[in-house]
Image (spheres, grey):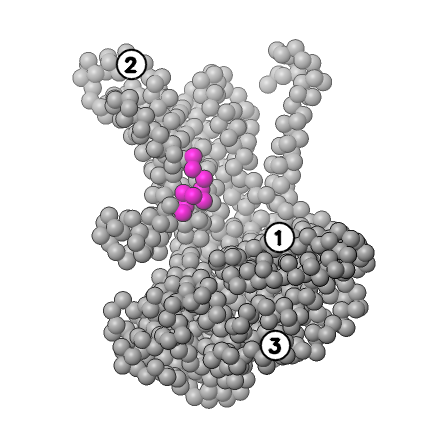
Amino acid sequence: MNAIASHYPSQHSGRHPHRRRGLVLALSATLAVTTFAACDRTSGSPASPTQNANAKDVTLAITSNSIAGGKNADEADWYKNYVIPNFTKAQKAKGVNVTLTFQPSGVDDEQYKTKLALDLKSKSGADIVALDGIWVGEFAQAGYIKPLSDVVGSDVTTWEGWSQIPKAVQANSSFEGKTYGIPSGTDGRVLYLNKKLFAKAGLPTDWQPKSWQDILDAGAKLKSLPGVDPIQINAGTAMGEATTMQGVLPLLAGAGTEIYSGNKWQGNTKAVRDVLTFYQTLVKQGLENTDFQQAAKGRDESFAAFAKGKIGILLEGDYFWRSVINPKNGDAAMATRDSDVGWAAIPSQQPGTGIGGSDTVSMSGGGGYFLNPNTKYPQQAWELLQFLGSADAIKALLGGTARITARQDVNTEVLSTDPLLTFISEKVLPVTHYRPGLAVYPQVSQALQQATADIVSGKSVDDAAKAYQTAVEKAVGADKVSAS
Amino acid sequence: MSAATIDAAGLGRRRAMLLVAPALILITAFLVIPALWTVYLGVTDYRLTGIQAANPQFVGLDNYRAALVDPAFRNALWLTLVFVFGSAIVGQTGAGFALAWTLRSVPKIVRTVVQTLVLLAWILPSSIVAFLWVAYLSRDDGTLNAILHTGGTDWLLAHPMLSIIVFNTWRGTAFSMLLFSAALGAVPPSQLEAARLSGAGTFAQLRDVVVPHIRGHVLTNTLLISLWTFNDFSPYLLTAGGPNHASEVLPVFIYNEALYGGQLGYGSAISFIMLFINLVIALFYVRLLRERR
């Protein structure tokens, strides 16, 4: 604003213009509006494990991408109603006054990740942070998180919970063989279907497609219903990782390849082109509403549309079932969920073409809780971490509902109570795959998202695949990309 | 400049320096150092996460070279020029002048009401304004669709650039309107009267009487709003640069590359290119201003 103040009077009083003054004015006006605030990189060593170990007054904070009344509301409520009062009480019994706060967040995962990266980079942020498993590598390499044994000490291996957590799930909070946090669970992906719309379109409500073509055929029938978008398989860059995880990767698995195997990333390969061709068919035949794939809030819009009964088939994880369309507290609550929504396993391109010759495929992920290496109270934060991973706390989070937790002892108790989770644990988890735990993965994922965005906006499969190849080579190096 | 020999304020060199020191310190801390820091980051492969976050390497001019051949950067630069031309130079200047000119001859109450409304669009916080526009342009139950009976049109997807240009014109016209109102007030009524008496129409009055008087104001106004618009981030709040980069103006492009994509080094290099373009724009206008005298 001082640019106005300093410049404006010169119109009237500047009868004797000075060359240099004009330049200075131009410069100051420019600088005043263009400065790109750079962040400081302070270096410092993390706190020692024993720091404040005997403190009687302790302040701790925990953050995750959940917020009361919004995203992952049940988790946010759990912190408020269970974790904070119970942990505080347990510590009080030991004579320690803990002030524990929860820092909520209700945004897209990528934005949450950026916020956390900036927090940790500036040596601030909550003492315990919830992270998606695929971010562990890049956060660890950046030094934003440190192995538990560095932050807390070698005692971490004695926690009772480790024996309850399967190795595949522990990988969600590990990087290069080191454990950085406690995993919070895993998940599986299926095709959800609206049984009412299926009945109206003359399709069986116990539908199980055997190939991609079966999905397209069902979509063609659903298309005859007015006001209905037949299929929602995420595409585009606005959806971020949801495009990769609920779109490209399950399809790629169905075409018989993992995104990374044998030390090579998929480039412009036949499998990638097949996946892009499938997307193109969805778009060309009008089976998928391209607005959802392009709008800034398209994923939320597609959820709302499904809840209103306007989408026939939607590919999502069990998160969708328990957090999004949950009639009790979902962010797009669907009152008739239990009667109207069915599910099917994701078919391979053709029967038997999935990875390892499977007929159906899925992808799984999962996150965990991690210690901020700059916590002032490493021991107390570790106690809180164990508390979060205890069987009692996890059961309190479930509150009678089911989800695939990290702990086997809890899973055997709860999974059988929910028909979808039973289906996922019996039919989906045996054929599921995990994303590579490499720091560069998110960049490859973004290239995949861009390739689908290109298809949705009308580019040819060849052009999109070529651009994808270039982007992946830039991210990982040309020698690590396979193309054929 | 001979400031050393002429000491009009009688402060003496020491006290004069003390007087400007706070301002200089602030400018150094918040403008010069960040700008230099940007230059430094621009020649590294610094990233938000991963190994390059802990250990950025010097890459010389690679980022600049990459930007010049990056179709996404060229796309962003082009869209920014379209955005500045459409919403600042044509939209805000045009609407601002039209408002200032018409409001001279309307009843005071009308003038006050219109000016207040236009000002309101300018002073409301961006986040609130963006929310209003998202609701206004929404595909489902949006106000614009209700008015035009175009149910189901997603304006932000179908016409992303037009949407943000109209939005920014609406948002920023107040500044031009105020500046031109003040400028028009300084045009001697006697000259306008004389022009009218000798039979000049509205256009001739504007061309021969008004424009020569307010030319400096036009240039100042255009300079400031071009720079503001060039650096304006609020389109992000409407379209986030989408669909598929169709409204990704440079500030949004930098945000997407640097923070969303984590490429802080590349983002910094582009920031510096932006700074340079700003400087060129500013110098261009300053030169025009000088020629007038």
The amino acid on which the numbered mark 1 sits, given as a three-letter code, is Leu
- Is residue B125 found inside the magenta-colored segment of the image? yes
Q: Residue at x 31, y 56 (%)?
A: B140
Is residue A211 magenta-colored?
no
Q: Amino acid at mark 2?
A: Pro
**What secondary structure is marked by label 2?**
helix
Label 1 close to label 2 by CB (< 8 Å): no
> Which part of the image, by quadrant, shows the C terminus of chain B?
top left
Looking at the picture, tell me which residue is in the foreground, A281 or A379.
A379
Q: Secondary structure at mark 3?
A: helix
Task: Tell me the quarter of the picture where residue B200 sits.
Answer: top left
Q: Amino acid at mark 3?
A: Val
Number of residues whose C-alpha sits closer than 10 Å to that of mark 1, classed few (under 14), some (14–19) or many (20 or more): some
The mark found on residue A118 in the picture is 1
Majority SS type along the magenta span: helix
Q: What segment is highlighted magenta in the picture?
A: B123-131
Instruction: Identify the residue under disc 3.
Output: A410
Q: Nearer the viewer, residue A465 or B106?
A: B106
Left or right: A182, with B166 as reference point: right
- Per the image, label 1 sits on a secondary structure element best described as helix
Task: Check the residue under mark 1 and report the chain it is in.
Answer: A
Marks 2 and 3: which is nearer the front?
3
The Cα atoms of the two marked residues, 1 and 2, are separated by 58 Å
Disc nearer the start of the sequence (3/1): 1
- Tags 2 and 3 both on a single chain: no
Residue A188 place in picture, x, y as percent: 51, 76
Residue visible at 52% across and 72% down in the picture? A401
Name above or below for residue A142 compared with residue B12: below
Q: Which residue is mark 2?
A: B189
| CA distance separating discs 3 and 1 | 35 Å
Q: Residue at x 81, y 56 (%)?
A: A54
Q: Quadrant of residue A53?
A: bottom right
